[in-house]
Amino acid sequence: MYITNLALALLALPFAALSAPSSNGKPLIDIDARAAAATSTPTTLSSIQSADFNSLAAKMPQNCAVGTLSVPVAGSLAVPAGQAVSMVTVGRGVQNYTCTNGTYASAGALANLFDVSCLFSITAKTIDPAILSSLLPKLASKALSFPDAGKLPIAINHLFVATPNSAAPGISPEFALSNGSDKIIVSKLANTPAPTDPSANVPWLQLGAIAGQGSLAKSVFRVHTVGGQPPSSCTTEGESLSVNYASMYWFTK
Ligand SMILES: *[C@@H]1O[C@H](CO)[C@@H](O)[C@H](O)[C@H]1NC(C)=O
Ligand SMILES: *[C@@H]1O[C@H](CO)[C@@H](O)[C@H](O)[C@H]1NC(C)=O
Ligand SMILES: *[C@@H]1O[C@H](CO)[C@@H](O)[C@H](O)[C@H]1NC(C)=O
């Protein structure tokens, strides 16, 4: 009886948290799915460095607390007083441009964001979050194409929508949970050139939630950008261009 229950429990382990009753009604084995999944997540810097982003993201546990982490900001970016980190994600997508008077003008973006909060919370005491934050977009940039074919669990869809409550035509960034339960539309509050290779890597940004457009977060920080910058000039007026990029997106509430 004991053997049978345990064997069944072990078979079920990868699929769900479980609580198999023993003969006296007390749980024989009671394992949190998150803890079980965490054991298969690399936890040393060298193992994360050599990991493939697809396999890292595919087995990432979800819903870990990250409120004590600090956003790795630079330049004029600053976390407003009273806000704490609510989610840490890696984005992979395209920055769009339109050729306007000889240079590429920004025309929005489209990206998939993957929740890596648990990787940060699991390693909080052993790996500097700024080092991890700088590493993950490089891994994502190397491993993923866009649109992604890997069927990774997308946490947030990043796109542009018409600017709400605005008389002037324009578009604004939106971040929407892929399960549809919340979103925010944001405006740019601060930007600073990428500290490394700013002609290739798009600027770091601080985005603030527009009131009344969802409660997913109060601020979003785009940091540790990889790629996304257009060529310095263009010749075909009106031409559209999409440039691949990856980035960290830190959410605070
Ligand atoms: C392009 O440049 C011309 C000449 O400098 C200017 O008159 C025009 O407004 C510019 N167009 C745009 C879309 O910026
Ligand atoms: C950006 O370009 C992609 C195609 O590369 C397109 O699917 C997406 O809708 C564009 N987004 C915006 C805001 O222009
Ligand atoms: C949607 O996803 C968020 C973030 O992972 C989670 O907190 C929330 O509970 C989910 N909502 C539903 C209805 O699944």
Image (spheres, rainbow, N blue to C red):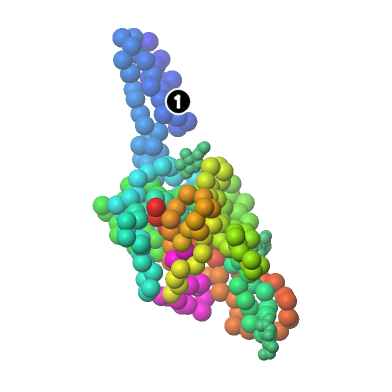
Image point (36%, 40%), residue name: 39
Query: What residue does disc 1 label?
Result: 11
- Report if residue 213 is visible in the image: yes
Q: Amino acid at mark 1?
A: Leu
Ligand 2 image-quadrant field: bottom right
Coordinates of residue 32 in the picture (x, y in percent): 36, 32
The residue most toward the left is: 125
Image point (29%, 52%), residue name: 68
Side of 92 relative to 80 (left or right): right
* Magenta region, main secondary structure: loop
How many marks the image carries: the answer is: 1
203 part of magenta stretch: yes
- Report if residue 222 is visible in the image: no
State the quadrant of the N terminus.
top left
7 part of magenta stretch: no
Magenta stretch bounds? 193-207
Q: Is residue 18 above or below residue 87?
A: above
Tell which of 168 and 63 is nearer to you: 168
Image point (66%, 67%), residue name: 169
Image point (59%, 83%), residue name: 232
Q: Is residue 113 above or below residue 237?
A: above
Label 1 near ligand 3 (CB < 8 Å): no
Coordinates of residue 168 in the picture (x, y in percent): 64, 69
Coordinates of residue 27 in the picture (x, y in percent): 33, 18
Q: Residues within 10 Å of mark 1 (few under 14, many from 20)?
A: few
Coordinates of residue 21 in the picture (x, y in percent): 37, 15
Tell which of 251 and 234 is nearer to you: 251
Side of 51 relative to 129 (left or right): right
Judged from the image, the secondary structure of the residue bearing numbered disc 1 is: helix
Q: Name the image quarter holding residue 70.
A: bottom left
